Amino acid sequence: MSSRVYLPAEAPLTMPTQSLSAKTDRPPRPDSAPPLLGLRRLFLFGVTIAMTIAAAHEMYLVLAVGGLTVLEIVVMALFLTLFAWIAFSFANMLCGLIGLTFGRGPMLGIDPTAPLPALSVRTALLVPTYNEEPHRVIARIHAIDESIAQTGAQSHFDIFILSDTTDPDVWIAEEKTFLELRARTGGQGRIFYRRRPDNHARKAGNIAEWVTRFGGAYENMLILDADSLMTGDTIVRLAGAMEHNPAVGLIQTLPVIVNATTPFARIQQFAGRLYGPLIARGIAFWHGPDGNYWGHNAMIRTGAFARFGGLPALRGPRPIGGHILSHDFVEAALMRRGGVGIHMVTNIGGSFEECPPSLTEYAARDRRWCQGNLQHMGVLPARGLHWISRLHLLTGIGSYIAAPLWLIFLLVGIVISLQAQFIRPEYFPKEFSLFPQWPAQDPVRAAFVFAGTMGLLLTPKLFGWLASLFVGSTRRGFGGAVRGFFSMLVEVLVSGLMAPVMMLIQSRAVFSILLGHDGGWQPQRRDDGGVPAGALLRIYGGYTLFGVALAIAAYQVSFYLFAWMSPVIVGLLLTFPLALWTSSARAGRWLRRLGLLVVPEERAPPQVLLRANELASVYEPSATPTPAFDRLLHDPELLAAHRNMLPEKPSRPRGDVEVPLVVGLAKLADCVSLEEARGVLSRAEKLALLGDVRGLEELQRISETNTLT
């Protein structure tokens, strides 16, 4: 038996590394562009610019009462930058309302009510995984495979589990559950597994390695994350749309968050379900064929991706240089530069994902995304990119730069208040004046500017709620109009209270990255999110103390400054109890019983979701995890399969040794039991031994010797 049993015959596809500096032709507009695209963009940017100009005028009147000081000019610049961001988001929501009202027809020929298209090409479903819980990943793959089978198009799809796992126990568990999956589904010949010994370039490298080895056999590839779930109906329709739109290189769906248990996850789930469709509709309205890619739940034309999507390593040291973490934005930009269309479709459902269960887990993932998005600064100057692609990169950067800008804005506001409170007026200015000059602002107009800004932030949420009322099944799915409205209020309140700590967390991440600290690549936790109170106090105690200091400082300056800062102060003071409450599965169940933060997928779960959750318990391991050595050496069939799944090792130059393997073999020579071996071997040494025939034979020797004695 050989690895051919677990992998298909190779079909190599060349994937050249793209240059960011070489001169390229201007990308043509694909024929999949919607009508009046220029007018749509004119509306979006016209609204954004008009609102920003109006805000600039009002803010100038607020600050220029006694003439602008240097600090007031700084505040003005920061305010306009942040306000333009808010206005842009508001204008996008208006585009969504227009698209929802006038654009209900098929997108790229996809009509969810029409019969399924007949397919003539093959598509690969790729599931990259990194130290994830295997039973959850396999359960979702099993449910997807069954859903595709129900469409009658299963012969057109293969599934690849692409592991980058570095935990030896998880690795062997992956192999075991993979073998169970193939046995339960009869998936031999269409469900495959491959683990990379070296996770070079992380997820982007994982996908690229598959493309260069197997991509030539598949017209399309559907990228799924380890937490992704899609219906067979949606997958077949996406594949059909790719066949009938040869100028399209990528179709991105809108994933809906499911399986949320904690209040934190339920808030993300509710917000994404209520506001997300309108935001996505707005994006599709003005992006046209110049869209973006979110890294998963998207159908991609394999040949176009191979030809144009090869990522270069950025110049300079990590964390800004090196391999690009947020690869999806860049891959979309390079493919669009190559002349293929990148589209978002919003008229089709059946696309799902999960989200982190707690603020702590969210912050860990967000740190990685922050680093990846800041790397886009090295991609922005690339030659030949479409201007909308550059805008995508800028918005990715801006989504994280906004946090420290907001923090600086608040701090400068405090300094201005100190200046007005304690600095003497300038009685003899250099320019002629009949009156002394001192810092002054118009508090009444400032209150109106603040109210208007908050209105722009909150009105899109109201739009999302109003849009849900016009579709009966959606309205009922949120618990009805009244419960949906109160759920929206809960989301606004809790999100508003958590915004200050998120500002500090993101600001800290930005400053840390710019100072050269690499955040690494951590696996994501997807369980109930419970974290001991003591651990949360250690994590968030500093933010609470910062809130206390901010409150004291603001009150010492003036009561009015304290009142102006109160939303931020209250949020920081409540950081610890909020983090504790929002990570509690029990609190999440309480909200569910009240009918708050409920989404349609909970009241009427799609079949594929029910099946995936049911299968998770079928594949779920025992309560006591089995170490890799014991699991492998006590299961002869698994051991034989494991050996056949090992890739051939490349030849090494003379004198070049695999240090973890050599050290691991030396340690094993002194061990008399597997228990002792587990205690003395490092993770890297365990991986090296499990990935080498000599290491496996030595482990077998120890196991057999221990059994005999």
Image (cartoon, grey):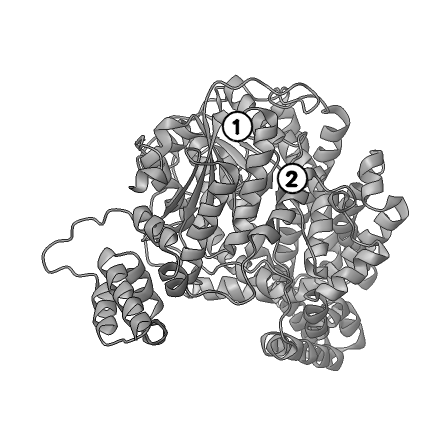
In-front residue for pair 395/254: 254
For disc 1, the neighbor class at 10 Å (few under 14, some 14 to 19, many from 20) is some
- What label does residue 608 carry, if any? 2
Amino acid marked by disc 1: Gln
Point 31% across, 30% down: residue: 11
Q: At numbered mark 1, what does the secondary structure look like: helix, strand or loop?
A: helix
Q: Position of residue 186 (x, y in %)?
A: 49, 36
Amino acid marked by disc 2: Val
Number of marks in picture: 2
- What label does residue 154 carry, if any? 1
Placement of the N terminus among the 4 image quadrants: top left
Q: Residue furthest left?
A: 654
- Asked if residue 351 lies left or right of residue 248, the reply is right
Q: At numbered mark 2, what does the secondary structure look like: helix, strand or loop?
A: helix
* Residue 498 in sight in this render: yes
Q: Position of residue 482 (x, y in %)?
A: 90, 48
Q: Which is nearer the N-term, disc 2 or disc 1?
A: 1
Asked if residue 263 is positioned above or below residue 144 in the image, the reply reads below
For disc 2, the neighbor class at 10 Å (few under 14, some 14 to 19, many from 20) is many
Point 55% across, 52% down: residue: 619
Placement of the C terminus among the 4 image quadrants: bottom left
Q: Position of residue 378 (x, y in %)?
A: 40, 48
Point 33% across, 76% down: residue: 676
Question: How far apart are the alpha carbons under marks 2 and 1?
Answer: 15 Å
